[in-house]
Image (cartoon, rainbow, N blue to C red):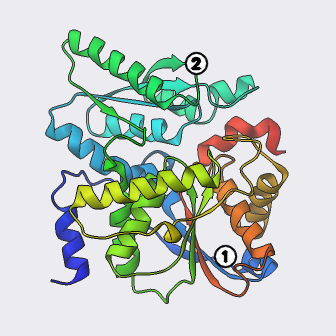
Amino acid sequence: MSKIAALREALAQFPRVEATHAPTPVEALPRLGAAFGLDLWVKRDDCTGIAFGGNKVRQLEFYIGAAQAKGADTLLITSAVQSNFMRTTAAMGRRFGMECHIQLEDRVPDVSALYQSNGNVLLDRLFGATFHSYPEGEDEAGADASVAAIAEGLKAEGKTPYVIPLSADSAPTGALGYVAAALELVEANLPPFDDIIVSSGSALTHAGLLLGLRALGNTTPVYGVCVRRNAEAQSARVAKRTADVAALLGLDVQVPSTDVRLFDGVLAPGYGQLNDAVLSAIKQTAQLEGLLLDPVYTGKAMAGALALAKAKKLAGRRVLFWHTGGTPALFAYADQLV
């Protein structure tokens, strides 16, 4: 059996809904690439379809498949206030006939009223999500426990909830979406890339993509740009999640620690907070290519890619920037962007 067939068979074990507009385009970014001395391309996962698209559509195909298999009628998720994941969960829940409860964590300090009400939050309300709040932004265990308590309350009301957990100890179901995305990229038979750049937060996208490529025998380096934790902490998380995905799929694929590449040079001052490099990357990408990036994930990922280019680590190389979406968050940061 070929590696492609084996990976398809492994993925077919899991219930899945169809929602992604796939394959997403791969486009050149000639002007931005020329400005930084590299052959730059973008994988347009901001075009995955529902509710402004993004990487969470791919992940939610598997979460909602699992929820349907369990007879769930309600989805629950916890994340930051301007979470793309919560917005997409609310939208896809409605697409597949489920209610959605979202728990907003206070991860970003000193935010404006705009941040609390516009962007993804506005869309969450339009999709009719039920809001809950959690005061700590860096307490994954506590946030998950809070969501579990909400789920128990819903059960008492006769609902059948399905919780989408985000902690590193949970099953990496969402990462399967990026194992499938790796398959999509390899099957496109494009001229090979020298490097891939992607934002690295919960690590499900990063780990799924990395594991999927290695399972297919593709050795392209994958650089994760840190958006929440420093490189040391994120490296341990990506390594664990990659091993978790391999185990979930039943694949004998090991990804050594040396294959987990991370860059945290544009992380400060922290998650969801702009810095000059990120603001510059957002504006340059918009003004040179007409392509929108968000302040939390893709803006930092592009800032990281451009910093690596300036350091001559990507000079002259053919680089694929994986756009994970997040466009609605721009409107929540309008007072900082212009």
- Side of 184 relative to 301 (left or right): left
Q: As shown in the figure, which amino acid type bears the numbered disc 1?
A: Leu
Disc marking residue 17: none
Q: Position of residue 22 (x, y in %)?
A: 37, 65
The mark closer to the camera, 1 or 2, is: 2
Q: Quadrant of residue 41?
A: bottom right
Q: As shown in the figure, which amino acid type bears the numbered disc 2?
A: Pro
Q: Position of residue 131 (x, y in %)?
A: 47, 19
- Mark 2 closeness class: few <14, some 14–19, many ≥20 residues within 10 Å: few
- Mark 1 closeness class: few <14, some 14–19, many ≥20 residues within 10 Å: many
- For the point 38% across and 67% down, the residue is 211
Q: Look at the picture and state if 287 lies above or below 37.
A: above
Q: Look at the picture and state if 232 lies above or below 74.
A: below
- For the point 34% across and 40% down, the residue is 170
What secondary structure is found at the residue carrying circle 1?
A: loop
The residue that mark 2 highlights is 135
Q: Quadrant of the N terminus?
A: bottom left
The residue that mark 1 highlights is 29
- For the point 47% across and 18% down, the residue is 132
What secondary structure is found at the residue carrying circle 2?
A: loop
Residue 319 appears in view: yes
The residues tagged by marks 1 and 2 sit, at their Cα atoms, a distance apart of 40 Å
- Side of 110 relative to 159 (left or right): right
